[in-house]
Image: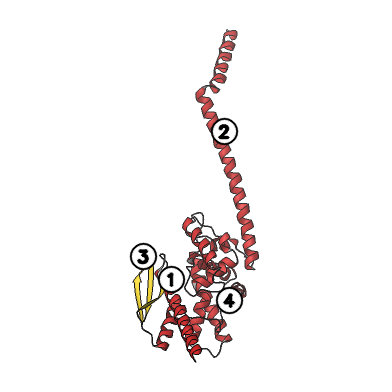
Amino acid sequence: MSYSIELNSMASSSSWWQSLFSPAKNAFTTHCFKRLQEYANLKMVKSSQEHKALASLNEMENIIGYKFKNKLLLQQAFTHPSYQESESYERLEYVGDSILNFLISKQQFFTYPNLSPGSLTALRAANVDTEKLARVAVKYNFHNYLQHENPVLSKQIRVFIKAIEKYPFHSYGLIDAPKTLADVVESTIGAIYVDSNSSVDTTWEVAKILLEPMITPEMLQQNPVRKLNELCHKKKLKIRFRDKWSKQGVYEIFIDNQLKGKGVYKAKKEIALNRAAEEACNNIINDMSTTDNVIESLE
């Protein structure tokens, strides 16, 4: 009797052991092993990403020249809305925009006591406009630390970096600066302000270095359209604008019924107009110079 039970037990055990390696069970075991391996790989990748993220935060602190008590603020300051993994910079950018305008206003009010409010406003605008701040972002390589999932933005940044080679200081409306780059500078300033317990002095110590070189009244230039209008008014020249932007991305400017300026930029109408105005200004000045030379030679 006991011998029979033992045989049955052995047979049952053998059957279970064999079933473990049956095709169905073997596939299940392989699947489980793969899932465990994937989980382990994911943990390794995540750990590596966290390590790289921490290293990036440290690098950014060194670039900015400020050590954050709450590093999550710095991470948030460099997170574009397209990046879903963490909160974006939008709230910090809102604060940074207001603080930066206040800081620049304060600095210019005391630095230039004889400037009129209108001149101060124009000077402040030049120092905090999108192109100026975007240049700051490129200068300090902020774009390399920006977390985003927007391929179009990457292309825009590359085009902007190439464009500023032609205009080393400021184009005053002739090139298209990605607003995101300016936003990141403002969000960084906002993050510093929040992290420093709303310290205006601490925030300015960092901001004034980032914004160098500041645009001074002597360096300030006019928008090309305004410059053209003033030139034509002074010389009593008749201006006519032809808007072909909606269909061709082109703006044309005629001076005394002669085509003197043509601006092409399909992405933004304002830039096409500015480029046409800049070309028209240059052509008018060249024509005037040529006329003066002819008169001098005749004399």
Image position, residue 182 (x, y; %): 51, 68
Front in this rendered view, residue 31 or 261: 261
What residue is shown with label 1? 271
Residue 33: numbered disc: 2
Three-letter code for the amino acid on which mark 2 is drawn: Phe
Circle nearer the viewer, 1 or 3: 3
Q: Earlier in the sequence, mark 3 or mark 2?
A: 2
Q: Note whether 30 is above or below 231 in the view shown.
A: above
Q: Earlier in the sequence, mark 1 or mark 3?
A: 3
Q: Under tag 2, what secondary structure?
A: helix
Label 3 with label 2: CB-CB less than 8 Å:
no
Label 1 with label 3: CB-CB less than 8 Å:
no
Q: Note whether 294 is above or below 156 in the view shown.
A: below
How dense is the environment of label 2, judged by Cα within 10 Å: few (below 14), some, or many (20 and up)?
Answer: few
What residue is shown with label 3? 248
Circle nearer the viewer, 4 or 1: 1
Image position, residue 278 (x, y; %): 45, 76
Three-letter code for the amino acid on which mark 3 is drawn: Gln
In three-dimensional space, the C-alpha distance between marks 3 and 2, rounded to whole angstroms, equals 60 Å
Three-letter code for the amino acid on which mark 1 is drawn: Ile
What residue is shown with label 4? 200
